[in-house]
Image (cartoon, rainbow, N blue to C red):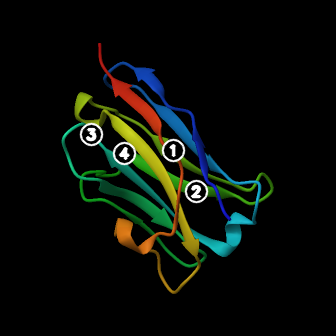
Amino acid sequence: QLRPVESGGGLVQPGGSLRLSCAASEADLDNYEIGWFRQAPGKERDFVSCIDESSLKYGSFVKGRFTISRDTAKNKVYLEMNSLQPEDTAIYFCAAVQARDGCSGYPRNYAYWGQGTQVTVSS
């Protein structure tokens, strides 16, 4: 069973950057659609970004600040986050599902979830 593992979260000042990583040792992530979601306390899980072999998408709040990418050699998917603001504070989750035609922004469409990594944006 695929078990995504997130890393790279932490505390950053407003305007700063972080790079999150999603890795899995059990399978080749190139065969999977990968999504990033986030959840702040008391709020629903929001779509951040997703990638598959033919497409990538971003949530409407991203506004060019985040970039999703794959490193096939390292079997990882990254989420580069720039110009972070306090409202970006949340637990960020990596999710995966067998690749289909076009990645999804809906959490219910993903079968495998990581434990999440905390991102805190504060001065």
Judged left or right of residue 21, residue 13 is left
The numbered mark, 2 or 1, whose residue comes first in the sequence reads 2
Precedes in sequence: disc 1 or disc 4? 4
Labelled pair 4, 3 in contact (Cβ < 8 Å): no
| Residue tagged 2 | 69
Mark in the foreground, 3 or 1 = 1
Q: Position of residue 99 (x, y in %)?
A: 59, 79
Visible residue check, residue 24:
yes
Could you say whether the residue bearing mark 2 is in a helix, strand or loop?
strand
Q: Residue at x 36, y 18 (%)?
A: 13
Query: Gap in Å between the C-alphas at discs 2 and 4?
Result: 13 Å
- Tag nearer the camera, 2 or 1: 1
**Residue denoted by label 3:** 40
Mark 2 Cα-neighbour bin, 10 Å: few <14, some 14–19, many ≥20 = some
Q: Position of residue 2 (x, y in %)?
A: 66, 62
Residue where numbered disc 4 is placed: 65
Mark pair 1, 4: CA separation: 24 Å
- Identity, as a three-letter code, of the amino acid under mark 4: Arg
Quarter location, residue 82 = top left
Q: CA distance from mark 2 to mark 1?
A: 20 Å
Q: Is residue 108 left or right of residue 32?
A: left
Q: Kindly identify the residue that appears in the image at 41 percent across and 74 percent down.
A: 109
Rendering coords of residue 24 (x, y %): 70, 54
